[in-house]
Image: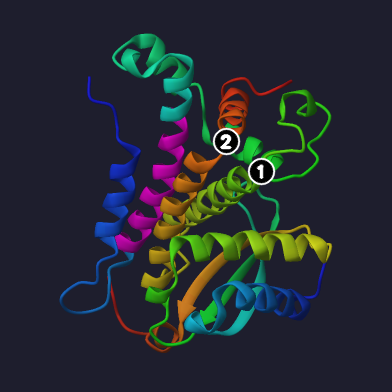
Amino acid sequence: MTTLNPDHLIEQAERLIVPPRAGPPRQVDLRRAISAAYYGIFHFCLTMAADEFVGVTQRATSRYTLVYRSIDHKILRDLCVEAKKQTPPAKFLPYFPAGGFGANIQAFSAAAIELQEKRHLADYNPQPRFGTSDAKLAVSTARSAVRRFQAAGEEHRKAFLTLLICPPR
Amino acid sequence: MLELSKVNEVVNKAASATLKRQAGVQRVFSEPASDSEGHEALRITIVLKRGSADKISGDMALDTLVRIEKALREAREDRFPIIDYVTEEELESSDDAES
């Protein structure tokens, strides 16, 4: 089975923001770029979580799909809101790294929420007019956010992914 | 909750500190908005000088976002900021027809 490569979503977004040979960029291209940039982050999280808890060699199994699909946008958003805080609420406290998530996960979390909001506007709100600069910076932010997550310490990455799969009640 | 003029001031200062001269934050304007969950939010537009968007890396944009959020939090502004970037030339051409 070939799984979706999150990096390809960000590459797709980069292709969509290349200026046309003539005339202004199409709104639909800029909107799809912003959407793909967010989905690059979203699917990156799903892949990391399923790889961690089921295994990268198990990608063709139904167990992998089950874990992959257990995470939705709200779960990611809710965790990112908490991960940005230095002091988490009580129910998260036992599962957070001592001293909270570091700067890398916090930056990743900020980008995930921001891009989720922009994706929502781009996909569903016909009113905003998107510019190339804005779309370009959304895409480069997504790529940078993924790098920051990968640069975080193993303990922090594992804690984040565990909370993504098992949000505390 | 801050006045919008104060929001603009806080964001301008935070963004200018990260983006520095190469990107040239020209001004900031903001308006009340709602986020995707219906909560109060701020739609904040950062106006950059001409041709400067290509000079901003992903790391710079991400650091700017983090810095803006921190500055607004410290100013006791709880509304979620949705940040948009636009260059002066994009603002001027905003009436161009496009599909």
Residue occupied by mark 2: A153
Tell whether label 2 touches label 1 (CB within 8 Å).
yes
Confirm whether residue A152 shows in the render: yes
Indicate whether A7 appears above or below A60.
below
Label 2 crowd (10 A; few <14 / some 14-19 / many >=20): few
Residue B80, given in percent of the width and then of the height, sits at 68, 57
Label 1 crowd (10 A; few <14 / some 14-19 / many >=20): some
Tell which circle, 1 or 2, labels the residue nearer the N-terminal end: 1
Give, as a single range, the part of the protein colored magenta: A28-46
Kind of residue at disc 1:
Gly
Residue A49 located left or right of residue A102 = left
Indicate whether B1 appears above or below A168.
below
Residue A63, given in percent of the width and then of the height, sits at 40, 10
Image quadrant where residue B65 sits: bottom right
Indicate whether A33 appears above or below A41.
below
- Where disc 2 sits, the SS reads loop
User: What's the distance in space between the residues labelled 1 and 2, CA to CA?
Assistant: 8 Å
Residue occupied by mark 1: A102
Indicate whether A76 appears above or below A122.
above
- Where disc 1 sits, the SS reads loop
User: Residue at point 55% right, 40% down?
Assistant: A152
Chain ID for label 2?
Answer: A
